[in-house]
Image (cartoon, grey):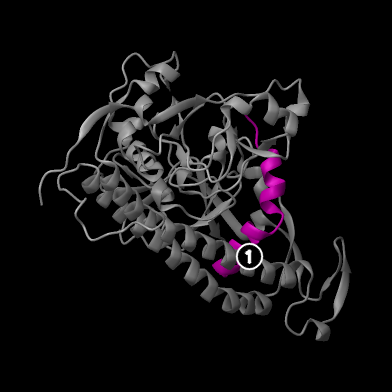
Amino acid sequence: MTQPKIRLILVSDLGRIVTGNTPPRKIKDYIGNKTTWIKPTDIEIGSRFIKKTEEKLSDKGYEKYHSSLLPPLSTCVVTIGTVGEKICLTKEESFTNQAINAIIPDKSKFDPMFIFYLLKYNLHLVELRHSGTASGRQNISKSSFGNIKLKVTDLHSQKIIGWILSKYDDLIENNSKRIEILNKVAQFVYNEWFVNLKFPSYQKIKFVDSDYGMIPEGWKIKKLGDIVKMTRGLSYSSSNLVENGKIIFVTLKCIERGGGFRYDGIKRFEGKYKDSHVVKTGDIVIAVTDMTQERNIIARPARIPQLNENEIIISMDLVKVTPIEELDRNWLYSFLNYSTFGIEMKEFANGVNVLHLKSEPMEDFQFIMPDEVIIQKYSETVSKIYYQIDNLYLRNHNLANSRELLASKLLSYDTDISKLDIVPEGY
């Protein structure tokens, strides 16, 4: 194949750049339920679209900021912090706050999906001069953002690139929906058995009085500290994080909002650590630090998946939850994920910008402990569900890796793809 025609352009050439706004908190009428309002904390690293925003603007807010309204398929880039780390596409009409610069694409010259992937995989490579703040964080102005130079190819090739890469994200998003459904099924079973107390053959079980009302005979009131031991992860510095270290380092970024494991949060560690910092496949960890305003991560659990490596350690932002005696981990994980544990514990977290949760409130958490027979039956019921969830997470991890390798190849424009026998859908 021949070399494609490429040219160097400015980000401002891609379309209209819009910097968002934050309504004054004293004017509460601007906040409502009309139009999506995106903040940096709403953007999940690795996700193409916003799943949910914490707030929306009202009709009054819509009219006030109408000039900065973004149509669907606008690319939003957080320009405070590590520029290019947080980036997303709008799925519907949306507004953003002032920490986000968005591009409304000029569709006569540029493909919206291509713009998203172009920025996603190139912004972190751009040298941004004189962009630091006193805290060392980047803070890119609208004009500086618009003056970033990037290489682009012709429109037809853009559409092919955007279409190919979007197919990977389509598969990832479909798998994520399946994960969500499977989690809801497991949660429904948990609630039915352990909240509504309608477990198999419950009609034949004698119920006795307790501080929590009538409970099945043989079930006991326990504290979490009675059944598990909590061990804090390793304190580290940025110098311990390396590209090709020998040890997998599981960090706070490995915790999904609401619970679950994220492969893209894995780091590599080099340095000293203790046996207490080591985890293995199947171990349960809980986040004890959070930087989201909504407290979506703190006190949320995740299970260590099969990572095909012998050495895995956890950071100080997590605690390892180890059963003191033999205890089924499927039930324990469900209890930590689906009971009121996370909701209640996040209120004990303290901090201004970064929230911290101590182990003591978690260890003091009281609950009704089922008998071993019911726990085992529950485990048998949900084990296949968790197996499917783990496989889907792994598939998404592999798809994301494949997408990144392909994006590196396609966006280097080493070969002319305009003559490929591909007709992008919707074009």
- Please indicate whether residue 330 sits to the left or right of residue 362 in the image: left
Give the residue drawn at x 70%, y 74%.
Answer: 371
Residue denoted by label 1: 184
Observer-nearest of 403 and 306 = 403
Observer-nearest of 163 and 191 = 163
Are there few (<14), some (14-19), or many (20+) residues within 10 Å of tag 1? few
Give the residue drawn at x 25%, y 43%.
Answer: 411
Is 56 situated above or below 142? below
Taking the magenta stretch, the answer to whether it contains residue 348 is: yes
Magenta stretch, overall SS: helix
- Please indicate whether residue 176 sits to the left or right of residue 187 in the image: left
Say whether residue 335 is visible.
Answer: yes
Give the residue drawn at x 39%, y 41%.
Answer: 116
Which span of residues is magenta-colored? 326-351
Q: Position of residue 61 (x, y in %)?
A: 70, 28
User: Where, by quadrant of the figure, is residue 353 drawn?
Assistant: top right
The single residue placed furthest to the front in the displayed view is: 108
Query: What amino acid is at disc 1?
Result: Lys
**Secondary structure of the residue carrying numbered label 1:** helix
Label tally: 1
Q: Position of residue 393 (x, y in %)?
A: 44, 61
